[in-house]
Image (cartoon, coloured by chain):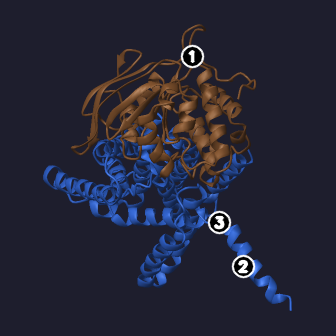
Chain colours: A brown, B blue
Amino acid sequence: MRAAQPPLPLPLPREGGGEKVGLELDVGDLRAGYGGLPVLHGISLIAPAGRITVLVGANGAGKTTLLKTLAGVMPPVSGSVRVDGEALSGDTPADRVRRGMALVPEGRHLFPDMSVRENLELGGYLATRAQREEMLDSVVGIFPRLGERLTQMAGTMSGGEQQMLAIGRALMSRPRLLLLDEPSLGLAPKMVDEMFAALRRINKAGTTLLLVEQNVFQALAVADFAYVLGHGEMIAEGAAWELRGNALIKRVYLGEAIAG
Amino acid sequence: MMRNIHFLIAVALLAALPAIESPFIQSMALTCLMFAGLAVSWSMFSGPTRYLSLATSAFFGLGAYCTAWGLGKLPWPAVVMLGGCAAVVFAFAIGLITLRLRGAYFAVITYGLGELVKHSITHVEKTWFGTVGRVMTETPSSATVYWTVLAIAALAVWTYVAFGRSRYGHALRGIGMDEERAATLGVNPMRVKLIGFCLSAWFAGALGAAMAVRWTYIDPHTVFNPFIVFQTVLISMVGGPLTIGGPLIGALAFSLLSEFLRLSLPYLYMIILGVLLIVSVLYLPDGIAGYDWKRLWEKITRRKAPEEKP
């Protein structure tokens, strides 16, 4: 676990040198839903800058809805979303990417008929050509397997490789806050380990991570802070190591996760 | 690099065609180039986004009417440019409304708005100018028209390739596969779609402006003919809009087919077109150029091999 990792080749921080990289995410009393049907009943959470925060919860608890609202593809009903203290209300998804937010969607959602390189380039859509090339090298540095397959169609890769591409594509916009929706879903155990190791390296370079997971044990192992979401409400929060020992969480959620 | 050279050689050879003094070959080449230009420009937008645009006839007709109004008052290149720009303005206006729609709605609305333009022009011509059609005098030579159409078609091919490689081209394909996903990556879908739609409209408008002089007399029913867009869509779909070879192969095949069949068997021609479209939609969803012919060839040869052995 403690084996020396090569330094992350991400060209972060963006401007200047000593400036902090990660953004702090502050969600206050967020309510959202689909066509009048409420899914989130007032969610509050803080993902501190430069840390890994994990959000666990069973299926249907509203995790994906929360991330969609944060990324700006779904409008909230009420409540606030702030990054580094600035409110995001009214920001389009593109504005949020410009601010340094990136989402790795659930089920990867790559562009299957586009090559690995084209998928990555689209991730750096808002960057200049030179920045794109630079970030492409960095991403290939983190996921060498992608470098070997730049011309392959994304849809023909294995699940683990697709997940790496999805993360790499999000990294192309040089995010300072990375939102991940169940990145371990459907991956072989070995790939899950590899993926979590990559996330830890990305975080070490300074990027704030908000990780939504059903793979509770491994998520709590990498995270600094954890929130437990149940049916649109926060039911527990605290340091990740604390929640690992929490009896209620074990019985209600971890038990369910193992059974299901 | 090699591709660039092939492209330039092809354009140079085509440019020399008027040297053959055969009106039949010239007219056939002109039709072929016109449909190549229309199909390539249609595929530029509708291929990656999978938006079935039926506005091509409207763009074409608007371009043609720009020629009818501007010929003699403006120099020839300006007339053609004006035709393209008129189509762009129209595309921008209808794009703002229709590009929020998807699927059949988009197709029906673009077709309907095209009809609206046709009838508006009919009305304006009748009430303001007291005419139902326009005769064009001072038309440029047929060689000039041919070179103009060739230049527009060549520019369309170049734009198709360059646009497809640009970040806008990638974004357009991303939107076609999953619009919301593209948006989360920072793409502004409406902006990118508008750019693609307007770009594709310019070529259709410019081609309409250039081709208008071939008829010498035009009225809204000839230049806003829905057959223009149907043929364009057919060529692109059968050829395959996702690679540049598709619309080009399609345009060549259809121009030859129509030239020979329409004269001898007018009804059979339309039937064959219909059957071809059905077959291509059912069995070649990505068109002739998008089909994996190599694999089919391997399948056939592998199946035949054991039969020959004993």
Which residue lies at the image location 44% right of the left edge and 34% below the top edge?
Answer: A247
Look at the image and tell me whether residue A89 can be seen: no
Q: CA distance from mark 1 to mark 3?
A: 44 Å
| Subunit of label 2 | B
| Depth order, front residue of A203/B64 | A203
Image height check: is B232 above or below A181?
Answer: below
Residue on which the image places disc 3: B292
Image height check: is A84 above or below A180?
Answer: above
Image height check: is B15 above or below A247?
Answer: below
Residue on which the image places disc 2: B300
Q: Earlier in the sequence, mark 3 or mark 2?
A: 3
Query: Looking at the image, which residue sits at the far front?
Result: A247
Question: Are the numbered discs 1 and 3 placed on the same chain, yes or no?
Answer: no
Measured from the top left, where is residue B305 in percent x and y? 80, 83
Quarter occupied by the C terminus of chain B? bottom right
Look at the image and tell me whether residue B209 can be seen: yes
Instruction: Give the mark toward the camera: 2 or 1.
Output: 1
Q: Residue A14, labelled with which disc?
A: 1
Q: Identify which amino acid the numbered label 2 is placed on.
A: Ile
Counting other residues with Cα less than 10 Å from the Cα at mark 1, is it few (<14), some (14-19), or many (20 or more)? few
Counting other residues with Cα less than 10 Å from the Cα at mark 2, is it few (<14), some (14-19), or many (20 or more)? few
Which residue lies at the image location 55% right of the left edge and 46% below the top edge?
Answer: B155
